[in-house]
Image (cartoon, rainbow, N blue to C red):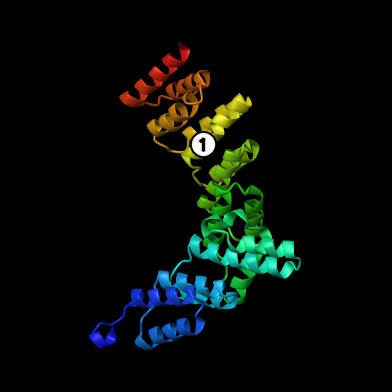
Amino acid sequence: MISLGYQPDVCTYTAFLHTYFSQGMLEEAEDVVAKMNEEGIRPDWMTYTVLINGYARLGLTHRAFDVLKSMVNSGFKPSDHIYSILIKHLSYENRIKETSCEMCLDLSSNVASVDIAHVWKILEFEIALKLFEKMDEHDCTPDTKTYAVLIAGLCKEGRLEVAQKLVNHMKERGISLTEDIYNSILECCCKLGVYEQAVRLVDAMVEHGFLPHLESYKLLICGLYQKGDNEEAETVFRSLLSCGYNYDEVAWEVLIDGLLKRGLIKRCSELLDIMVERGFQLNFQTHKMLIEGLDGGVR
């Protein structure tokens, strides 16, 4: 390329790195890194990702964490994909250290073959602690963003127990929960039907000035009604009306897409009455859809 007058850029170097690491050619990959430094080519987010994944795949997790430190020092924020890579390989290393029998080695192989997108299914609390320990060792202290990424990934897979342990660990380290973390836990509670905990979370969020997602409110209110806890459902709805959401959004999300879709016609009518009593004005289309839904349910 250079002989033809073309100067390799960061994308070109990153492509070479990906190829060499994929073929297990560590020395050649490190020559590319050295050449980038020599030419003053700064790594971008993709370069760091390739380096972290490459070193981790070769069992050089300490080098992967060195790259993570450089990444953070350069102003890049590690994404859920980066953490997924590190978690996957830490999980694999942990299995190898703990096992010696043939059956257990097969289990370790299964961990190694897990797709990055599904790594949250295998993440255990002890591995998360190992991740934090490694980050601390490399002067890359876990922050709120680190916890938020892990908790969100766990919650999407319904891993509430492990996510809750991370929340407790945050509190022990004096790190405050963010609105995103609260909402991740809340949504997971609602999807798992853990409504009592969800109600407590909503109360805690409102108390701290955070806004629960409307989707979570819908799942919680509908779930409480289906469980037969009508009074609590109405209390949560009244709390929702004080959150500042647009009333038409509330009506569409909770009443139409929530209660009417689930056949809870009477409950929908009761909550609509509460909105009317408070003087909330819905636009024509929203009101029309509600009336048609209620009339259709009565028939």
Which amino acid lies under the numbered mark 1 shown in the image of this protein? Tyr
Around disc 1, counting alpha carbons within 10 Å, would you say few (fewer than 14), some (14 to 19), or many (20 or more)? many
Between 188 and 200, the one nearer to me in the picture: 188
Q: Position of residue 50 (x, y in %)?
A: 46, 71
Where is residue 100, by image quadrant? bottom right
Residue sitting at x 57%, y 58%: 119
Residue 177 visible in the picture: no
| Residue under label 1 | 217
In what element is the residue under mark 1? helix
**Compared to 35, does 263 lie above or below?**
above
Q: Please state if 236 lies on the left or on the right of 243 as rendered.
A: right
Residue 132 coordinates in the image, percent (x, y): 62, 67
Q: Is residue 256 above or below residue 96?
A: above
Residue that appears at 47% across and 26% down: 261
Q: Is residue 1 above or below residue 72?
A: below
Residue 176, percent from left and from top: 58, 57
- Where does the N terminus fall, quadrant-wise? bottom left
Front-lying residue, 76 or 6:
6
Q: Residue furthest left?
A: 5
Q: Is residue 225 left or right of residue 81?
A: right
> For this rendering, which residue is in front, 142 or 36?
36
* Residue 273 percent coordinates (x, y): 46, 20
Let me know if residue 107 appears in the view.
yes
* Residue 64 picture quarter: bottom right
Looking at this rendering, what residue extends furthest in the right direction? 101
Q: Residue at horizontal 66%, vertical 49%? A: 161
**Image-quadrant location for residue 224:** top right
